[in-house]
């Protein structure tokens, strides 16, 4: 009977390990990239809006030198609130649907006003060719804004539907995994209802194994995927993506260590209990 129980414990510990890893992975996914509030908080966390502002300034400066126009013509082309609203509107659209806000028309209007004001103040009359060149620069400035702020618009058409379906599927999977996990724990508890030290020992082994495997999974991803060289759409969005990936992987490391420590404590406690008896 003891041999049979040992075999059952090994089987239960094995499946508990898999269930803990799967449940944790699904819960991390559910509470990070699938949550709008998490994504918005991460935008604030890494000063994403400031990074976009810096990239916009650099982009404007490149064309300012080429145009020969003074620097002040390229200042105050957008408001900080408009920039933040444009960026947040993408996040809102991804998770809630609706319409995407874009202030590129405002940028177009302001660059035109600034150029006209500069020409008027300096009594400059443009020839037809010069007018066309100015119009090209105005369009380029708008493109710079759209590239840094709105470049995702061409890639996210079906994303809201996919995220909605994924959220539903993840919730169902999460519930299924947790129910199965609870069932296995209760089964092992009933199996060792008169030998609680054996029950704690089995759970401890599963926790240690889960923690070690989560830690190894994180290390394997770091080793085999060059996350720092990920490039998507533009530099600001690439940095944001990398930050999210690192944040999620760090959770695997931190909680892997916690699981391992809890499992180790449980095994030590169960063995001390055995000896005291």
Image (tube, grey):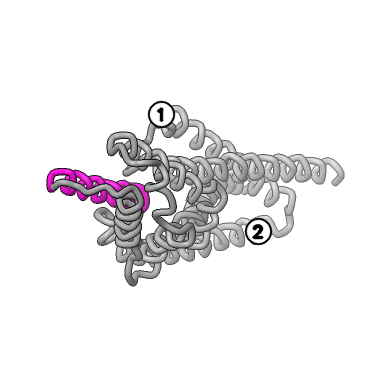
Q: Is residue 262 left or right of residue 231?
A: right
User: From the viewer's perspective, is residue 117 above or below residue 255?
Assistant: below
Instruction: Say few, some or many: other residues with alpha carbon within 10 Å of mark 2 (under 14 / 14 to 19 / 20 or more).
Output: some
Q: Which residue is mark 1?
A: 224
Front residue of this view, candidates 256 and 137: 137
- Predominant SS along the magenta part: helix
* Residue 217 higher or lower than 144, as above or below: above
Q: Image point 30% across, 61% down: which residue? A: 105
Question: Considering only vertical position in the picture, is 127 above or below 36?
Answer: above
Task: Tell me where the magenta segment starts and ends, as one range.
Answer: 128-150
As drawn, the residue found furthest toward the left would be: 128
SS class of the residue under badge 1? Answer: helix
> Residue most toward the right?
276
Residue 189's disc is 2
Q: Where is residue 4? Give x, y as percent.
A: 57, 47
Q: Is residue 90 above or below residue 214?
A: below
């Amino acid at each position: 009977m003891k041999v049979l129980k040992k075999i059952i414990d090994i089987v239960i510990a094995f499946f508990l390990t898999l269930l803990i890893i799967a449940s944790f992975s699904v819960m991390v996914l559910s509470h990070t990239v699938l949550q709008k509030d998490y994504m918005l908080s991460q935008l604030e966390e890494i000063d994403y809006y400031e990074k976009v502002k810096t990239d916009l300034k650099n982009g404007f400066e490149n064309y300012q030198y080429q145009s020969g126009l003074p620097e002040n013509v390229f200042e105050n082309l957008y408001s900080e609130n408009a920039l933040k609203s444009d960026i947040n509107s993408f996040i809102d659209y991804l998770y809630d649907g609706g319409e995407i806000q874009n202030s590129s028309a405002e940028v177009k209007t302001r660059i035109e006003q600034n150029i006209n004001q500069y020409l008027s103040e300096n009594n400059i009359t443009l020839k037809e060719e010069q007018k066309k060149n100015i119009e090209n620069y105005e369009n380029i400035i708008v493109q710079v804004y759209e590239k840094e702020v709105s470049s995702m618009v061409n890639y996210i058409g079906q994303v809201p539907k996919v995220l909605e379906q994924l959220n539903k599927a993840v919730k169902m999977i999460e519930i299924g995994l947790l129910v199965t996990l609870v069932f296995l724990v209760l089964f092992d508890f009933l199996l060792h209802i008169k030998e609680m030290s054996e029950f704690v020992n089995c759970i401890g082994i599963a926790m240690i194994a889960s923690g070690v495997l989560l830690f190894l999974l994180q290390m394997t991803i770091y080793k085999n995927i060059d996350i720092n060289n990920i490039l998507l759409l533009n530099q600001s969005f690439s940095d944001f993506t990398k930050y999210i990936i690192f944040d999620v992987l760090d959770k695997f490391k931190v909680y892997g260590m916690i699981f391992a420590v809890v499992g180790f404590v449980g095994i030590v406690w169960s063995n001390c209990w055995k000896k005291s008896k």
